[in-house]
Amino acid sequence: MGLNVPDNLARELALANRILYDQQIVDGLGHVSLRHPEDPSLFLLSCSRAPALVRPEDIVCYRADGSALDTEAPRPYLERFIHAEIYRARPDVQSVVHSHSVSVIPFACVQQPLRPIFHMAGFLGEGSAHFEIRDAGGDTDMLISSSYLGAALARSLGSRSCVLMRGHGSTVVGTSLRQVVYRAIYAETNAKLQLSAQSLGDPVYLNPREAQLASDANDGQIDRSWNLWLQRLGALDFIA
């Protein structure tokens, strides 16, 4: 693997990319990262490649300023600053997913938070945060392509697990790679259900205590879903 990229984490991160594609959270765009377990100032992220094509050898180790440790690393994602600045602002965050999953985007555009409508989305108990890029950078191409914009996004995220980005997508954080993949998938599912429920009337959401209890219970079951997602990929040969 590349400079300072542990082999086992490179494989796991490549699989996470492919799972997110298989679950229709990312397409040719979007990315997932992992804080380096031995040096919290570093993080692991693929080079600029479509998630479904990411291989272990594509994983690069980056510094907090978004620069690669390996000076010969392939071209990076333009939006690596999303990951860099969230890790800088949130010591508790160990993994980050940025995506453009389609059911989430309307909530960002009307500034309506995602709220947990079923137990699988208990991690949304505080509701999602909202990021308006115009407040930080005026009229832009909507991309988080600098440390300045990444820091603004991290401030909007605050202590929450999900931030919606108007006209763009969303970013979800977690305490592990498998947890953040789970959260990205179920944020999209919750958005679909929330929109459906709102068309029928006023939804009854999980209250904060219910949401926390559900989130804690779900965290103990993530490996079961992860193994199913791997089986869908036929990933056993990939990780051997």
Image (tube, rainbow, N blue to C red):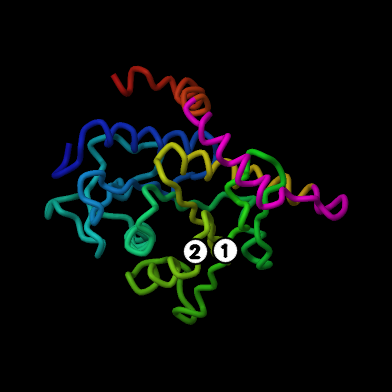
Give the x, y percent position of residue 35: 30, 48
| Circles 2 and 1 in contact, beta carbons < 8 Å | yes
Q: Which mark is residue 129?
A: 1
- Amino acid at the residue labelled 2: Leu
Q: Does residue 98 show up magenta in the picture?
A: no
Q: Residues within 10 Å of mark 1 (few under 14, many from 20)?
A: many
Alpha carbon distance from label 2 to label 1: 6 Å
Residue 95 shown left or right of residue 122 in the figure: left
Pick the front one: 232 or 216: 216
Residue numbers of the magenta segment: 197-223
Q: Residue 226 carries which label?
A: none
Pick the front one: 148 or 39: 39
Q: Tell me: residue 198, above or below residue 193.
A: below
Q: Is the magenta stretch mostly helix, strand or loop?
A: helix
Which residue does the image show at 87% across and 53% down from the upper left? 201
Q: Quadrant of the C terminus?
A: top left
Q: Dot 1: what SS? A: strand
Which residue does the image show at 38% across and 32% down from the upper left? 15
Give the x, y percent position of residue 184: 52, 45
Give the x, y percent position of residue 198: 81, 53
Is residue 74 something one can see in this rendering?
A: no
Residue 156 shown left or right of residue 36 in the figure: right
Q: Does residue 220 show up magenta in the picture?
A: yes
Residue wearing tag 2 = 157
Give the x, y percent position of residue 23: 54, 35
Looking at the image, tell me whether mark 2 or mark 1 is earlier in sequence order. Answer: 1
Q: How crowded is mark 2: few (under 14 residues within 10 Å), some or many (20 or more)?
A: many
Q: Tell me: residue 136, above or below residue 13.
A: below
Residue 90 shown left or right of residue 99 in the figure: left
Is residue 194 something one can see in this rendering?
A: yes
- Amino acid at the residue labelled 1: Ala
